[in-house]
Image (cartoon, rainbow, N blue to C red):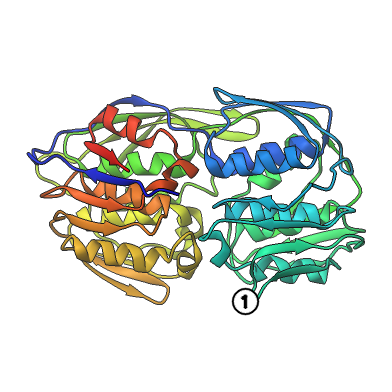
């Protein structure tokens, strides 16, 4: 893959307010699940608002390779002709999951109960990510799973395993692991129960219900009984709050901004970014709210600080950490722009994302003159003046976009290296960003 770099920030460095009304792309987590569940449902499902990014397309192409007829995507529209719980066919070769941890971890659960052997591979980044967290519970259920040395992809699921239900206490708060075990539970004998140590995103539970499969929910417990079936459904995918987060932070740090984000998914397991920004003093208003396909949706109006005020550094509540796990790179930028010190703890999960997001963000902020001290499970950031310079994103899409947000306040241009994977979650990021007042040039 050829490297793509961003040159972000105006050389004149007059800070201009952000303004406008935009709709960011569809939610990535829900896009993945709409394809998975539509494929194993009975009947034809229609999806609108599908995210046409590389990660979600990896999931879509995997099911095409297993014999599912899928029309689209075209302008976010997808039609899936479901084959039922046991209608998937062995692919001709390995399934390439690209950069998508969601695809490989959720599919490992769904495919563990099929009657064929299948191997999943990924790109260089995905090939370093830990899979033991899903292979351990799958092995307890009776699946035969092989990984590379060190428990990383490629991941091979052997055929012929009859899965059995288990009671499983998650060792970490992870929606991907929870979903993997529940999806394997659809194919297991008896009841499969997962207990989570802290709330994580619940899109799997909500969407299984939308497809007619009962999920028992009791406090931190989630359970399914194997042997049921899914019925086709129509899914309208809201805008991804993880993508909206870049604009929520941007408008919260740039003085006099007034930006409205349309049709944003407001799932209560995903709103940590809003909770944290509001705790820092951000002005974020819910303009309208509704429920679409079981998911809460709202328009969000964000107004920037006035009269020389800034966001305030805080100690981030650990209860918000799993609710904002993907948004921390850009929240670190909010901390850099704030007055005082921001402390994050309880976020060791950030070290095993597409990159070590704690270390990579700390390195980048230090290069821009911000005092950022990484810790084992978090970071301590002193707000200050963001300078220009060269930062390395390590091909992590959220790192690339976070430093683009930092450029709004930087004293000089920020050269962000390795931005090729932005398309995995936000294909039109540069276009939308420049539309509302960013200054980003792309070089490859």
Q: Does any portion of residue 85 appear in the rendered image?
A: yes
Q: Is residue 439 above or below residue 177?
A: above
Residue at 64%, 25% in the rendered image: 72
Residue 143's spot in the image, x, y percent?
A: 83, 66
Residue at 54%, 33% in the rendered image: 52
Residue 294's spot in the image, x, y percent?
A: 65, 34
Residue at 44%, 39% in the rendered image: 426
Residue at 81%, 32% in the rendered image: 82
Which corner quadrant of the image does residue 292 belong to? top right
Quadrant where the C terminus sits is top left
Residue 208's spot in the image, x, y percent?
A: 74, 42
Between residues 215 and 409, which one lies in front from this camera angle? 409
Residue 144's spot in the image, x, y percent?
A: 83, 68
Relative placement, left or right, of 386 versus 113 is left
Q: Which residue is mark 1?
A: 150
Relative placement, left or right, of 133 versus 245 is right
Between residues 321 and 421, which one lies in front from this camera angle? 421
Q: Residues within 10 Å of mark 1 (few under 14, many from 20)?
A: few
Relative placement, left or right, of 40 versus 190 is left
Which corner quadrant of the image does residue 108 belong to? bottom right
Relative placement, left or right, of 410 versus 158 is left
Give the number of marks.
1
Between residues 40 and 288, which one lies in front from this camera angle? 40
Q: Does any portion of residue 195 appear in the rendered image?
A: no
> What element does badge 1 sit on?
loop
């Amino acid at each position: 893959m050829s490297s793509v770099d961003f040159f972000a920030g105006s050389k004149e460095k007059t800070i201009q307010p952000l303004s406008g009304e935009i709709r960011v792309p569809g939610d990535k987590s829900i896009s993945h699940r709409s394809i998975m569940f539509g494929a194993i449902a009975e009947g034809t499902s229609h999806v609108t608002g599908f995210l046409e990014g590389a990660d979600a397309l990896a999931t879509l192409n995997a099911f095409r390779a297993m014999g599912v007829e899928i029309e689209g995507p075209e302008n976010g529209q997808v039609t899936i002709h479901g084959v039922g719980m046991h209608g998937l066919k062995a692919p001709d070769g390995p399934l390439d999951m690209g950069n998508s941890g969601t695809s490989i971890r959720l599919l490992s659960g769904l495919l563990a109960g099929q009657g064929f052997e299948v191997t999943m591979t990924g790109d260089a980044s995905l090939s370093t990510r830990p899979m033991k967290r899903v292979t351990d519970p799958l092995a307890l259920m009776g699946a035969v799973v092989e990984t590379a040395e060190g428990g990383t992809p490629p991941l091979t699921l052997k055929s012929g395993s009859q899965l059995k239900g288990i009671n499983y206490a998650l060792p970490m708060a992870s929606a991907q692991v929870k979903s993997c075990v529940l999806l394997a539970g659809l194919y297991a004998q008896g009841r499969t129960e997962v207990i989570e140590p802290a709330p994580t995103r619940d899109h799997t539970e909500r969407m299984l219900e939308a497809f007619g499969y009962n999920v028992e929910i009791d406090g931190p417990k989630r359970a399914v009984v194997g042997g049921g079936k899914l019925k086709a459904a129509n899914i309208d995918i809201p805008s991804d709050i993880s993508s909206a987060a870049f604009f929520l932070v941007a408008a919260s740090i740039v003085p006099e901004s007034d930006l409205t984000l349309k049709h944003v998914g407001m799932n209560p397991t995903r709103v940590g970014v809003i909770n944290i920004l509001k705790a820092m003093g951000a002005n974020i208003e819910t303009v309208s709210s509704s429920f679409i396909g079981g998911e809460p949706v709202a328009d969000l109006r964000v107004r920037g600080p006035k009269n020389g005020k800034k966001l305030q550094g805080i100690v981030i509540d650990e209860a918000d950490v799993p609710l904002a796990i993907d948004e921390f790179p850009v929240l670190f930028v909010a901390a850099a722009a704030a007055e005082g010190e921001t402390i994050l703890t309880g976020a060791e999960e950030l070290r095993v994302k597409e990159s070590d997001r704690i270390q990579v963000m700390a390195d980048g902020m230090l290069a821009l003159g911000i005092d950022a001290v990484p810790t084992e499970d978090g970071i301590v950031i002193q707000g200050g003046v963001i300078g220009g310079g060269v930062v390395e994103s390590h091909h992590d899409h959220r790192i690339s976009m976070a430093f683009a947000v930092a450029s709004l306040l930087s004293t000089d241009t920020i050269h962000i290296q390795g931005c090729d994977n932005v398309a995995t979650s936000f294909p039109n990021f540069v276009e939308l960003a420049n539309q509302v007042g960013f200054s980003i040039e792309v070089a490859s």
